[in-house]
Image: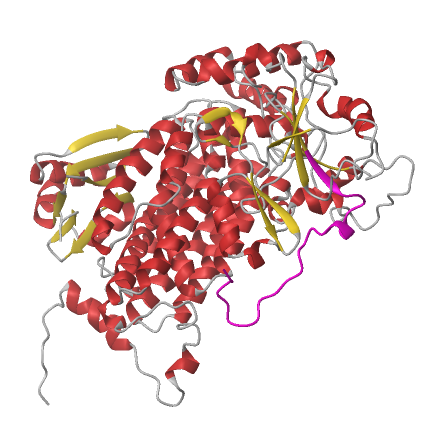
């Protein structure tokens, strides 16, 4: 027997052998029965073998590098926990960003895991299937490592304990939840453009990079570690998103209008979810890395500009809402933080009015807008609070039918006027915060008439515990909703100034720095 | 346009009027964004418009320092963005207000904290 | 002409990778941020295995980049010897 010694395979050969060459064409069953979801969205694919992962990552290499990432991550988390690392953060106000992240973002990581598993199964091409499989595994790793990392904070701080329960119920969490539910109930191609391209490629830098850099800057090694570990996977996800859109557009010219609509839709859906990040960056970090406006300019305007200049060769245009989003960058974070300041009683994290030093930073970063439009509001709140009248809004807000955010967004060219749009559909009125959200509704009204709008659900009586008796004279609907949310009054909610978190943190810091 | 779906795709609207204790009205006080968004409130259709302003609004808008200075006779009203003149002595239903209508009012001379529209 | 960029976690391994990028891309713009470094290069960036190995004094597999990557932009072309980001076709 001849023994043939093979030379070590190159990256390209290895990738071909370990992905495409392991795939097969079904013969026992009809192709369309094995891959039943490839036709109905109208996308035409002629040759799946034209897709190639430019990283040429194979499953064996994937396991190797992922194991390395996990080892690094858990070494840091253990060290952080053993050394009471939570006492090293700049200020306990910072910890509220983690509560926002755990309730709003980590459950989406899990949904992304499900979404990519589904899409990977639906695609007949071996290249995208393997890339989706890897991403699906990445996403569940992200969910797990985030939950694990933040469980350390749960031992010391309020507001972490009911994150999963709250994700399905609390008013502001319906925003990220409905965003992902919308994507995962779409077809496999739309899901890929929605999450793989629009979110991962165009917008995810704005979520993760400032958040993780912010964690590092504020002394939170735990969040920095899970953030970087997750982010090291994102480059692969972004690459899948970019390659898949190029692949779809190259396959058939008829795909362009369908893809363009999805880009417009999902840019806007994702941008609305990032509202939470804008206020996190400008208002919630005690030490700020950069303003939302600066991050927007770097990642959306410059980087997004380069991307869409490149995609123009396929006839793709920049997302319809991009111009408005660029106008909003001077206003978004200030308006958003006011919403959470208003409804601080109904959220499982604390809010506060910015200090004089915070406002100085804000006016330097927003010279055209902060002093003119927003400073009087925060000064008024501070004065009221000093006199014992911290403002809590107790009437429920009007929500946008599509993004489900309270209708606080202003007209693109007039920051003093709240924007209203409306549509009639089958005899019912629907209201929207923007042209972007109205257009999304008008395109698929049957989908969005099902929106589970938290405010409407409360009024319909669907947000109370089963033992509640509304006929009792002392029935307090808002308190009952909070009980259903599992928010503990005075511990999880209200202003940071009055919180046990603040009191405990200050006490522990004293203990940590002397006898 | 229709939803692209693998089968029949028809659903009842989640927020029809029959599901609420009373029709929902959306109300906003222009130039007072301290109240971060318009409000959603189920008001009985038999409620007199004037009673809503003078009876219910203090509990909703009273926290703003401008509220004590509001003159209801001078207030300018808008319905779905168009100028509109309600009759204070008539009920909401008689004023033609139905489920999920949106009304706004402007109070001339009162433009929020230091004129900031907040 | 648009920039391509790559962002890496800041540690001893990436210090060598960044030195290699600077050596092979004279137009590189280094931007140090908390715990990370972002490197922009007009239009095209190359990371060479041989240069990184010289900096590290050990063998280096370009796919090790995945452990330290934070984000990047541009079209990727990766072989055993080079990792290229560019906006050209």
For the N terminus of chain A, the quadrant is bottom left
Q: Nearer the viewer, residue A77 or B47?
A: B47
Label count reads 0
Is residue A62 shown left or right of residue A480? Answer: left
For the C terminus of chain A, the quadrant is top right
Q: Residue at x 52, y 30 (%)?
A: A336
Is residue A360 shown left or right of residue A126? Answer: right
> Quick check: can you spot residue A515?
no
Q: Nearer the viewer, residue A109 or A1?
A: A109
Image x and y of residue A148, in percent? 51, 46
Is A132 included in the stretch rendered in magenta? no
Is residue A486 shown left or right of residue A151? Answer: right
Magenta span:
B1-26
Q: Nearer the viewer, residue B82 or A133?
A: B82
Give the prevailing secondary structure in the magenta stretch. loop
Image-quadrant location for residue A222 = top left
Is B12 included in the stretch rendered in magenta? yes
Q: Residue at x 41, y 35 (%)?
A: A211
Q: Residue at x 45, y 39 (%)?
A: A274
Q: Nearer the viewer, residue A83 or A288?
A: A288
Image x and y of residue A326, in percent? 37, 33
> Quick check: can you spot residue A2?
yes
Q: Measured along the vertical axis of the image, is residue A389 above or below residue A308?
A: above
Q: Measured along the vertical axis of the image, is residue A145 above or below residue B86?
A: below
Q: Measured along the vertical axis of the image, is residue A151 above or below residue A137?
A: above
Image x and y of residue A435, in percent? 47, 42
Colouring rule applied to residues: secondary structure
Image x and y of residue A124, in percent? 34, 74
Is residue A124 shown left or right of residue B103? Answer: left
């Amino acid at each position: 027997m001849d023994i043939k010694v093979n030379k070590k395979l190159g990256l390209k050969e290895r990738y071909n052998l370990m992905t495409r060459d392991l795939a097969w064409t079904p013969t026992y069953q009809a192709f369309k029965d094995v891959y039943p979801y490839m036709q109905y969205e109208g996308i035409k694919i002629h040759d799946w073998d034209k897709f190639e992962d430019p990283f040429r990552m194979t499953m064996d290499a994937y396991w190797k590098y992922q194991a390395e990432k996990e080892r690094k991550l858990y070494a840091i988390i253990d060290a952080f926990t053993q050394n009471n690392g939570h006492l090293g953060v700049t200020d306990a106000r910072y910890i509220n960003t983690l509560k926002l992240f755990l309730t709003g973002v980590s459950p989406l990581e899990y949904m992304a895991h499900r979404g990519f598993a589904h899409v990977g199964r639906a695609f007949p091409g071996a290249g995208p299937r393997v890339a989706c499989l890897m991403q699906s595994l990445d996403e569940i790793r992200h969910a797990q490592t985030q939950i694990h990392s933040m469980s350390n904070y749960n031992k010391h701080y309020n507001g972490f304990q009911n994150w999963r329960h709250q994700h399905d119920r609390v008013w502001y969490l319906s925003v990220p939840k409905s965003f992902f539910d919308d994507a995962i109930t779409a077809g496999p191609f739309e899901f890929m453009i929605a999450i793989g391209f629009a979110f991962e490629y165009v917008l995810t830098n704005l979520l993760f990079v400032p958040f993780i850099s912010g964690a590092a800057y504020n002394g939170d090694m735990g969040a920095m570690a899970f953030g970087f570990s997750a982010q090291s996977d994102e480059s692969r996800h972004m690459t899948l998103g970019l390659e898949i859109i190029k692949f779809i557009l190259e396959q058939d010219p008829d795909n362009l209008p369908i893809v363009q609509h999805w880009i417009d839709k999902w840019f806007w859906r994702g941008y609305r979810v990032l509202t939470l990040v804008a206020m996190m960056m400008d208002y919630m970090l005690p030490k700020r890395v950069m303003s939302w406006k600066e991050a927007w300019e770097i990642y959306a305007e410059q980087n997004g500009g380069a991307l869409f200049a490149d995609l123009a060769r396929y006839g793709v245009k920049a997302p319809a809402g991009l111009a408005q989003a660029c106008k909003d960058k001077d206003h978004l974070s200030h308006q958003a933080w006011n919403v959470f300041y208003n409804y601080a009683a109904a959220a499982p994290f604390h809010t506060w009015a910015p200090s004089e030093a915070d406002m100085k930073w804000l006016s330097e970063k927003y010279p055209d807008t902060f002093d003119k439009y927003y400073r009087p509001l925060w000064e008024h709140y501070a004065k009221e609070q000093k006199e014992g009248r911290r403002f809590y809004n107790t009437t429920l807000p009007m929500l946008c039918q599509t993004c489900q955010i309270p209708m606080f967004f202003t007209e693109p060219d007039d920051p003093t006027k709240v924007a209203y749009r409306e549509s009639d559909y089958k005899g019912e009125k629907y209201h929207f915060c923007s042209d972007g959200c109205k257009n999304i509704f008008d395109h698929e009204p049957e989908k969005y008439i099902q929106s589970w709008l938290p405010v409407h659900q409360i009024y319909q009586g669907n947000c109370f515990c089963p033992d509640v008796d509304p006929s009792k004279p002392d029935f307090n609907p808002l308190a009952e909703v909070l009980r259903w949310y599992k928010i503990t009054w005075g511990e999880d909610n209200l202003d940071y100034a009055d919180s046990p978190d603040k009191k405990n943190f200050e006490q522990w810091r004293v203990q940590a720095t002397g006898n | 346009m229709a939803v692209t779906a693998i089968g029949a795709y028809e659903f009842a609207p989640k927020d029809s009027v029959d599901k609420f204790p009373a029709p929902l009205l959306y109300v906003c006080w222009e130039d007072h964004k301290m109240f971060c968004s318009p409000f959603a409130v189920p008001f009985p259709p038999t409620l007199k418009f004037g009673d809503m302003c003078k009876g219910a609004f203090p509990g909703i808008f009273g926290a703003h320092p401008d509220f004590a200075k509001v003159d209801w006779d001078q207030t300018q009203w808008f319905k779905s963005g168009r100028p509109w003149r309600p009759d204070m002595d008539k009920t909401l239903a008689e004023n033609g207000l139905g489920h999920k209508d949106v009304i706004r009012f402007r109070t001339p001379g009162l433009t929020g904290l230091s004129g900031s529209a907040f | 002409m648009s920039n391509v960029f790559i962002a890496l976690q800041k540690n001893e391994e990436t210090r060598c990778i960044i030195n290699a990028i600077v050596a092979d891309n004279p137009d590189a713009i280094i931007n140090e941020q908390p715990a990370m470094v972002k490197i922009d290069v007009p239009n095209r960036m190359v990371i060479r295995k041989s240069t990184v190995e010289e900096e590290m004094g050990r063998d280096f597999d370009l796919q090790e980049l995945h452990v330290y990557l934070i984000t990047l932009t541009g079209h990727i072309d990766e072989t055993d010897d080079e990792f290229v980001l560019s906006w050209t076709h």
